[in-house]
Image: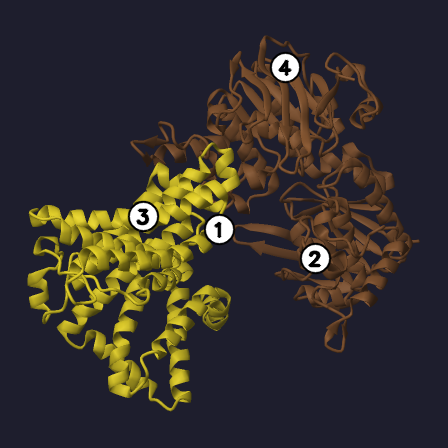
Amino acid sequence: MNKIVKIFSGSIIVPLTAIVMGLLVGALIMLLGGYDPLLAYQSLFSQVFGNLYDLGETFREITPLVLTGLAVAFAFRAGLFNIGGEGQFIIGMTAATFVGIKITGLPMIIHAPLALIVGGICGGLWAAIAGYFKAKRGVNEVITTIMLNWTALYLANYIVRHFLLLKGQQRSENLQDSASISIQWLSELLGNARMHWGTLIAVLAAVFFYILLWKTKQGFELRAVGLNPHAAEYAGMNVGRNIIKSMFISGMFAGLAGAVQILGVFHYQSVMSGTPGIGFDGIAVALIGMNHPFGVLLGGFLFGSLTYGSAGMSFGAGVPPELIRIVIGSIIFFIATPGIVRYVLKPLYAKRKKEKVL
Amino acid sequence: MIAANPIVELKSITKRFPGVVANDSISLKLHKGEIHALLGENGAGKSTLMNILFGLYQPDEGSIEIDGKPVNIDNPNKAIEYGIGMVHQHFKLVQPFTVTENIILGMEPKKGLSLDQKTAANKIKELSEQYGLKVDPNAKIQNISVGMQQRVEILKTLYRGAQILIFDEPTAVLTPQEITELMEIMRRLVAEGKSIILITHKLKEIMHISDTVTIIRRGKVIDTVKTSESNPNLLAEKMVGRNVTFKVDKQPAAPGETVLSLNDIRLMRKDGVSVLNGLNFDIKAGEILGVAGVDGNGQTELIEVITGLRKADQGSIKIHGKEIAGSTPRAFAESGIAHIPEDRHKHGLVLDFSMSENLVLETYYKEPFSKRGFLNFDTIKKQAQRLIEEFDIRTPGIGTLARSLSGGNQQKAIIAREIDKNPDVLIAAQPTRGLDVGAIEFVQKQLIAQRDQGKAVLLISFELDEIMNVADRIIVIYEGKIVGEVLPEHTNDQELGLMMAGSLAVGGHGHE
């Protein structure tokens, strides 16, 4: 019982309050802009939960965000800042597309998982490049992962144009049906929303993250290296190898995110003029989730539903959908500054304390 | 010299933290021009009390009076306004900034829109001369010694007009020469009318410099005495609560065969300076070999080389006759070398890991702590509980973060972990640095117990007393070379001091 109280007062109350405060800041800005915040949030809510189709699509939106969020959070736990979720995402997409188109004659039960796994591994290897430079040469991973984002973008476009192109179009051919991870019956149930197994994979990935980091020998090393590389080295751990490993695992999450988008949602890959942004959004999701895998699940849910709901906000209340970015930004700001949130909560705590004394 | 009315009076200060009463109704009077020592073991509540005076914590009960007037100090800025300055144990300086920039940080003098550094630098120079600090206002912090950095901290308080200076364990990081100089500075400060509170657990310093001593044990004032009417034994007894012997009890060593031998170890730093210049020595089973030397003569590199953290450029390291130079730290550990590191925060512990995690930091990968890649929390927990009990580590629980333990208990945890590995060679680098009398006694006893069990112990220390008391054989390191080997019973501080300064070479391993 005590433990439950502790969890709630310690780690849940503060982010929840931060979310409420972020929504309030958004409301304030809407008021300043002459919009009706109540109507706006109401339309946002009904956009997300209003009907089955939108509910399904919200989950479609959430899924890759959870995975890229996990990517950032995992690297962070190992003391690394992976800003390259974007590039790893693109590499994951491209690898999955390649396998989905070029490998033929496999049954679905093998083809789809194979495309997924290859997507994840390629994303991981892409991130491991930055890890290798960090471990061997001390190059800051922030710089290399950002550079690799652009490299990934142009590499992906090159591959699509030269190997996978649908004649006369700026996109690849369609994947073979055997590579799809869409869930037909669920989509039909939810008004043809694009439902796929990726959502389940994202949840499993969070569980994998948790078990790997806190229950295994390997996780013990990764955390030790992340918190104090000097002590880790002294204790006989191979710091460099652990850095490469954490980058690989981190990149694998982002690569999976790209793969599930292709295999579950689009079923083809476009030639991109810019990076899709889901990798960068993963940073925000990880921050909201306070770098904990289950926090990331919730953070992804929040980020995804706000983003998806912002369209409703613009239909229903005329509020520009970009405004939701201000709300998300404010939420992150308040989560990153627990001091402010505690200050706001202070009168509440004081009251409770008094009651206890009485 | 001592005025009748105290300049600072703390009246029955009580401060509670969850689970502990850190200060239990503590009263203390500081008179003008006095050096008042606050003596107590690690975790006795000295720092808490001073943090209350400096406005970092609020007392739950009690009051503070300055010059006879009750004051409410609820933040450090208020404390500074009342003329209280604190010289922290861990310096709060910006490394790439100059002395002047560090001192004016937070209260920059302005001339129009620009920073007026010149006036500040002049004022700092004046203050520095007045108190004999010899600080160059334009030097960068990263280029000056630790002793100088401390003087910058002192100047920082003086610049802000401090009348009452709190020194928190000021000598913990200093070399013997720097300590003597600091004592001079403190005398100068009180001669100029400042008052000083000195937090320490080093009895020698208290006897040397303080006028009055207040002894705190487990959050309570045990006694306040005039230094001149006291003696070290009495103070130690009051501090620890039992009789403490300063003589280390030990039987003569019975050295066995050579366990670890170093031959012609050479190492060049990245900047081309050669730090180890052909080191040779052997350690036998059942002896404590002391390495004496002034800080910076290659000790750190020597430790890194014999623990595998750094590869020597040349030379051999043999354990039981087997060459291990060039292998990984883990290979060194597995061949029987355990290591109590010099810097326990940097190398010894992962501060944000729990006690149980820290206690298996080097053995987590072995059975029974891990099985098929998964950690076995039951055995890890049992191991932690056993070590905590055996080595009397005072921690609220095995889940407590290492960060929140006192220095003495952190060190106990490291020693517990290392000794429990049952090593053949135990390397102890500055094992008692920053510890109080009780903990020092504990650590030294453990080292001797290891020796008596037939382990080879290498003790590297800057404290001559420790080397003289604990080691069975002493080698002196100077500029990366062993310049002499002596037996503690056949030498004295003076001879060792000369050897450490490089002006005398004695014994078998001397090269010049």
Q: Write down the residue under mark 2.
A: B97
Is the same chain shared between marks 1 and 4?
A: no
Q: Position of residue A78 (x, y in %)?
A: 42, 47
Q: Are marks 3 and 2 in contact (CB under 8 Å)?
A: no
Q: Chain in brown?
A: B
Chain at numbered mark 2: B
Q: For numbered disc 3, what is the local secondary structure?
A: helix
Mark 3 and mark 4: Cα distance apart in space: 48 Å
Mark 3 and mark 2: Cα distance apart in space: 41 Å
Mark 1 and mark 4: Cα distance apart in space: 42 Å
> Which mark sits nearer the N-terminus, 4 or 2?
2
Q: Position of residue B121 (x, y in %)?
A: 82, 62
Kindly indicate the quadrant of the structure image that contains residue B82: bottom right
Kind of residue sitting beneath label 3:
Gly
Identify the residue at image location x=22%, y=78%.
A47
Q: Write down the residue under mark 4.
A: B282
Is the same chain shared between marks 3 and 1?
A: yes
Chain at numbered mark 4: B
Q: Are marks 3 and 1 in contact (CB under 8 Å)?
A: no
In front: A95, or B61?
A95
